[in-house]
Image (cartoon, coloured by chain):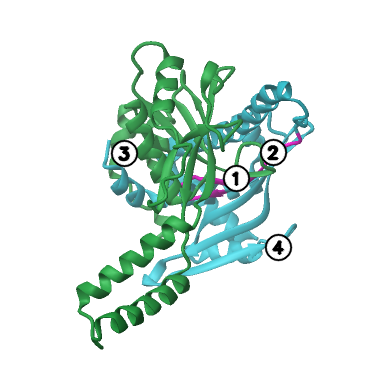
Chain colours: A green, B cyan
Amino acid sequence: MGLLSSRLSITRYKVTGQLNGSVHETVYQGLKQHAIPKIEDDGSEATVGWTSFETPYTPDFEGYSFVFGNYMVFALRIDKKSIPPKLIQKHYVLNIAKHQANTGRHFLSGNEKKAIKDDVFNTLARRIPATPNVYDVVWEYDTGALWFSSNLKAANEALETLFIKSFNLQLIRLFPYTTADLVADLSDQERDVLRKLEKSRSEE
Amino acid sequence: MLDIAIAYSRYKFLGNEFLTWLWFMIASDQDRLRKYDTDLVSLTVGNRLVLENTRHNAKETITIKGDNANLEEGLVALTKGAVVTEIHLSYKTGAQTWGFSLKGESLNISNLKLPETGPVETPEDLEGVVLEKVYLIEKVVGLVNNLFAHFIHLRLSNTWDNQTAFRIRKWATSK
């Protein structure tokens, strides 16, 4: 669900640290270096990379096209192959039978069964195309505010991993504790109280 | 700062208490909410409210759904020690209305419906629409940050236990 959808989800983040040199050029280089490959990797189960907001299926960051006013808007794309378990099971059973017929043996060792299963998985993974999922990112560099258009755990974890790899900046998810710590402008005394805070007596 | 994973679990309760306080404020003190957000015309509970009671080592979940649903069952749950874990809100400023859900443990925003924006008919329209959407999202994110900041200052003050928590209990039992 992206920025232009009629309904969207938002996970709030705080980016800490500063980029060296020109912000737009450094972000451009990070996006380009970790862009999703244009040619699909046949063997891998999932591919993760940056793509452009405007053209998510043909990543293009030229001319700083990701800059919209004070914001940088781009997207995370996760291309994942979903192979139905029943399809794996079907080809696994057929391959076992074929292997037994070829070798004349009725029983196969655990290692042989595993090798056949891996082979089935890899063969199917090469034949089945990956399904792309696109999640938009809005980043206001000056304030360190970043919004990600998904609440899905796996997508958020993929964002956090790729972000630090691409820009060498820490991305902190804003949940109750981090919102209190980073957004609410607490005094030192309030921070001390927060550290020891327990559930309200009325809510116990 | 604490380890992020530990902090998330350790302070989940804070988000649920925030939503419980927010429901109380919506029901009893819109004027104060307008002071917190000067653009606010009204903030109301939308079509979903989820409460959870984990007292006595058991987990009980109460979900109230539907437009203009009767929230009395939720108030009864509050008196028994439940807290709000998810709330759908309708936020109005002037002629614009936003609808969105907020989860206590994560403060994640979901099901966000923004006020209407112009259509993207040509590539030149895109930048204007994106900036308008960003502005409209910023209003909701700003509201959440602002309300949570007011809540947390109150929650960390001496007045929470003997005044605010008392007022919330009184409100829940008086209905």
Q: Give the residue at x 69% y 38%.
A: B114
Q: In the figure, is residue A84 to the left or right of A18?
A: right
Q: What element carries label 1?
A: loop
For disc 2, the marked residue is B114
What type is the residue that disc 1 sits on? Met
Q: Disc 3 is attached to a residue of which chain?
A: A
What type is the residue that disc 2 sits on? Leu
* In this view, the mark in front (2 or 1): 1
Tag count: 4
Pinpoint residue B131: horizontal percent, then vertical percent.
65, 24
Q: Give the residue at x 53% y 27%.
A: A60
Q: Disc 4 is attached to a residue of which chain?
A: B
| Residue B115 visible (yes or no) | yes
The quarter of the picture where residue A163 lies is top left
Q: Disc 2 is attached to a residue of which chain?
A: B
Q: Give the residue at x 34% y 32%.
A: A164
Are callouts 4 and 1 both on one chain? no
Q: In which quarter of the image is the C terminus of chain A?
A: bottom left
Q: How far apart are marks 2 and 4 (CA)?
A: 25 Å
* In this view, the mark in front (2 or 4): 2
Q: Is mark 4 on a helix, strand or loop?
A: loop
Q: Earlier in the sequence, mark 2 or mark 4?
A: 4
For disc 1, the marked residue is A1
What type is the residue that disc 3 sits on? Val
Pinpoint residue A191: horizontal percent, then vertical percent.
32, 34
Q: Distance between the residues labelled 2 and 1?
A: 13 Å
| Magenta residues (range) | B102-116
Q: Closest to the observer: B149 or B65? A: B65
* In this view, the mark in front (3 or 1): 1
